[in-house]
Amino acid sequence: MNAAPEKPPESTMRASPRAKRVRGWWLAALALFAILLLAAFGWLPSYIALPAIVAVATLMAIEIRFASRGMTIDAAPRLVPAAADPTAGLVALINALPEPALLVDRTSTLIAGNVPAAAVFGRIRAGEPISFTVRNPQIIEAIRAAASGRTERFEINERFPAERALEAHVAPIVFAHELPELFLLSFRDLTQEQRLAQMRTDFVANASHELRTPLASLLGFIDTLQGSARNDEKAREKFLKIMGEQAHRMSRLINDLMSLSRIELGLHLQPQTRVDLARIIAQVCDTMGSLAKERGVALTLKREAQEAFVLGDRDELIRVFENLVENALKYGASGKRVEVTLSAAAGEAAVSVRDFGPGIAPEHLPRLTERFYRVDVEQSRAQGGTGLGLSLVKHILARHRGALTIESEPGKGAIFTARIPLADSGIAKTEAATAS
Ligand SMILES: Nc1ncnc2c1ncn2[C@@H]1O[C@H](COP(=O)(O)OP(=O)(O)OP(=O)(O)O)[C@@H](O)[C@H]1O
Ligand SMILES: [Mg+2]
């Protein structure tokens, strides 16, 4: 509950009594002088002048008595707020708040809203009913409850202009001992918090699921080898091969998860070694040559810049490009061609990996870098994928102060582009190399 606001200090609430007193003395002295002057020239009969002098002197004596008690003649205690309009002060206050806040009156009419509120609710129009801005019946109920002095707190979900979960807080504003005429609606955005909680739950569920499948298969084969296939040499060979593959899959998954958390921990630490991306991608294309051959895909490397120095961690960058090229060879094999291009311009190196396979539908694009997200889970699993590759790519690039962009048109393939800022001297070197 909100406590009634404290009475502001006297000095801020009232016009200065000292200034009033000085003004009063001057007026009285002036009146006395005028009466004496008029009497001296004979323009004022003494039967009027004398009582007038007595009256003014009495008034001055009374003033002296009250002044000695620390009061002025018109000193009836009266609260005069520092700002003429208290609402203006409140509007200024909510404009200074970092969280979304709205001010409404007893009739649930919107009086004002701050910039964060406009970002959440889309539009703030003073004079409109609050329900035009916050489409939630609980708000009106809460204002009603707040009118009797209660503070309300509850959660609401807004769908427009974007989907958000908010904690709403409706509090009455009480001046002195009057009934509340104004209400402060403040909000806390819970969207990110809830999204993170959901991601944590999904992560645990996905990781356990990914480990459980190969583990179940291993346990099954161990049973078979101990039972029916105990003396079957051929079956044993076959099963041991599958068991080895499954164990590798589990080990890869755990390694990927550990890499992810290690990279996340060091996300704020930008690598400081100068490495040449041209050499790194040449090495990756060499390593991937055998997989390309196996898949019947022509893998080509085009260098628009002869060298591109960036501040980087060599092993992590190899991992980025291996992942992108491997994906292109695995999921875009039907296009028969994968092109890797290195370019450097405007202080930035860009490596794009383009395939001509089936491409990716637009609704999947924003989610591809989420952990365990796969367009086709079975297809990915069949290829030994864990769904962590692009998540690793995104985190490694973030550590390098770079970014990943994905473009795709279904049926025409996909282009994954990694951009990393060039190391300062690297820009000069690349330009010199291109010029020569
Ligand atoms: N070039 C591509 N063409 C079509 N789909 C792709 C392409 N690259 C990635 N994808 C889709 O994105 C998903 C996520 O890719 P990611 O690299 O994160 O995981 P993965 O390849 O399945 O597993 P991992 O990389 O751990 O082996 C893939 O499962 C696939 O569905
Ligand atoms: Mg991958």
Image (cartoon, rainbow, N blue to C red):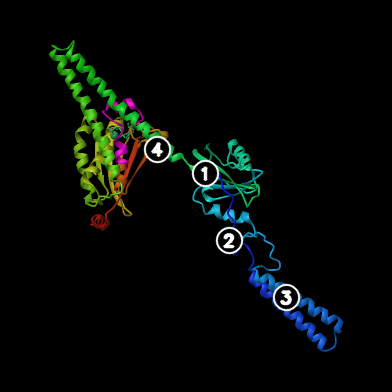
User: Which residue is more in the foreground, 85 or 349?
Assistant: 85
Residue occupied by mark 2: 9
The answer to if 382 sits in the magenta stretch is: yes
Q: Amino acid at mark 4?
A: Leu
Residue occupied by mark 1: 187
x, y percentage for residue 74?
71, 66
Q: Amino acid at mark 1?
A: Phe
Q: Give the residue drawn at x 24%, y 37%.
A: 299
Q: Residue 42 appears in which quarter of the rendering? A: bottom right
The answer to if 59 sits in the magenta stretch is: no
Figure quarter occupied by ligand 2: top left
* Spatial CA span between label 4 and label 1: 19 Å
Say which of marks 3 and 1 sits in front: 3
Q: Earlier in the sequence, mark 2 or mark 1?
A: 2
Q: Which mark is residue 286?
A: none
* Element at label 4: helix
Q: Amino acid at mark 3?
A: Met
305 in relation to 63, above or below: above
Say which of marks 3 and 4 sits in front: 3
Q: Which mark is residue 196?
A: 4
Q: Earlier in the sequence, mark 4 or mark 2?
A: 2
Horizontally, is 392 left or right of 94 in the view? left
Let me know if residue 308 appears in the view: no
x, y percentage for residue 226?
17, 14
* Spatial CA span between label 3 and label 1: 59 Å
Contact (CB < 8 A) between labels 4 and 2?
Answer: no
* Spatial CA span between label 2 and label 3: 29 Å
User: Which residue is more in the foreground, 151 or 109?
Assistant: 151
